[in-house]
Amino acid sequence: MESLHVFCKHLPKIELHAHLNGSIRETTLVQLASERSVTLPATLLQHEAEHHDPDSEALFNTKPRSLEECFEIFAYIPRCVNDIVALKRITVEILEDFANDNVAYVELRTGPKVLLVDHTSGEQYCTKKQYVETVLDIMSSFEGKERKRYERELHNSKDRNLVRLPLVPRLLMSVDRSGTLDQAEENINLAIDMAKTHPHIVGVELGGNPTRNDFRFFEPLFQKARDHGLKVSIHFGEVPTARNDSDSSDPILKAAYDEAIAVLNFRPDRLGHALLLPHVLMEKLMRKPIPIECCPTSNVMTLELALHYGGNLVNGMKKHPQLGKWKSRRYPFSINTDDSGIFCTNLTKEFLVIATAFDLSKDDLVDILIQSVDHIFDGTEVFREKLKTLIMGRVDEL
Ligand code: 6MZ
């Protein structure tokens, strides 16, 4: 276990499904809340002190976190990250955390927000565009520093494969499905407009509370984004659906099924989660796969699988409704954190927990990782091939 942990830690990884405001360190969230006189309900806070260390051996002791609880805590976050000062802080810390976890490429996703400039000095607001520019500026300067660090260390090192790869950050702009069509349109137009001059913006995504609204409501906007060259990822299969087209006994399940069919017919570039799929939909995907962004711990938590196994994440993971099948049928998927702050996780833990639950070898993990490089939204084939070569170079040394 220990050697597998070290292997997962040093493996250069890629992250394709991470929500910015869900990836806040819990310690930072608590501090921001206190500075802004926001009282966070103690029941929503996750970890005992020993779990704060991301490398802690107490890996899998996360408290259960239902989907409902996730959205309860998401409602508090904008009151804590309410100004540009906080946004800068969390963005830098999140990039540092991914870099320290040996992540070589990350696509962060976030819904642009109107924030205060500084919560301590009055009521001056900045625009959604300034929100995105703030994140992009931090990404660019972080990427520049990482590249310089990498070149310096290469220069000083006898073996280039021992040097930690630089973190390359990219951005997806989110549409929150519980918001209005006007808000969604504003975000999509902003993404299209800003992507013309900001190559860090590589796509758009639909997320938010899966019990609210319907993909079809937003579909023309995602088509527009796609027509402008942006890639599209859609959260999918987070709530149960009817079993098939003729199963219409429950109108909510039937609507969820019809929505799922609409998503699949749209053929997004990637699907987030894709958890609760009836056989018919899974077989439809098997025939013409769309890469899935799997978020193992988040899935087990939101489906409350660990709850039934005394809080044991590994046992809960064994009951993951899809992961075992995807692996055995060689379905294209990537491993991601979703909300590392909310679920007390990082990519090392995600690789370790699936390896432990499904008895995967180091080669299996590398296999999953390398095939998922093809799912990256950053455009060039050359970039992806180079990344695979760099990852394999490091793997040879592990
Ligand atoms: C659906 C999720 C999510 O955009 O404020 N979000 N949406 N399913 C999930 N699985 C648990 N986890 C996070 O990031 C926080 C927002 O991301 C979405 C929610 O809308 C949440 O408010 P940003 O940076």
Image (cartoon, rainbow, N blue to C red):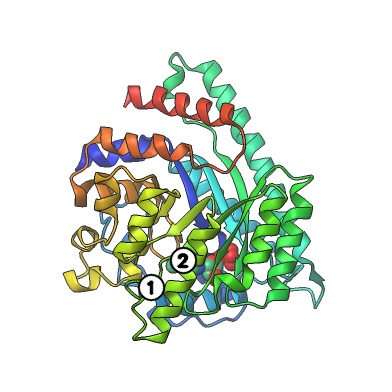
Left or right of 357 in this view: 32: right
The residue lying furthest to the right in this view is 124
Decide if residue 266 is on the left or right side of residue 331: right
In this view, the residue farthest toward the front is: 246
Specify the label residue 226 is tagged with.
none
From the top left corner, tell me how far across and down residue 170 is, in percent: 61, 46
Q: Is label 2 within 8 A of ligand 1 (CB to nearest ligand atom)?
A: no
Can residue 49 be seen here? The reply is no
Q: Position of residue 61 (x, y in %)?
A: 26, 63
Figure quadrant of the C terminus: top left
The spot of residue 324 in percent (x, y) is 24, 52
Q: Which mark is residue 261?
A: 2
Q: Which residue is the extreme one toward the top?
A: 158
Say which residue appears at 47% left-offset and 47% top-offset: 15
Numbered disc 1: secondary structure? loop
Three-letter code, disc 2: Ile
Q: Residue at x 58, y 22 (%)?
A: 152
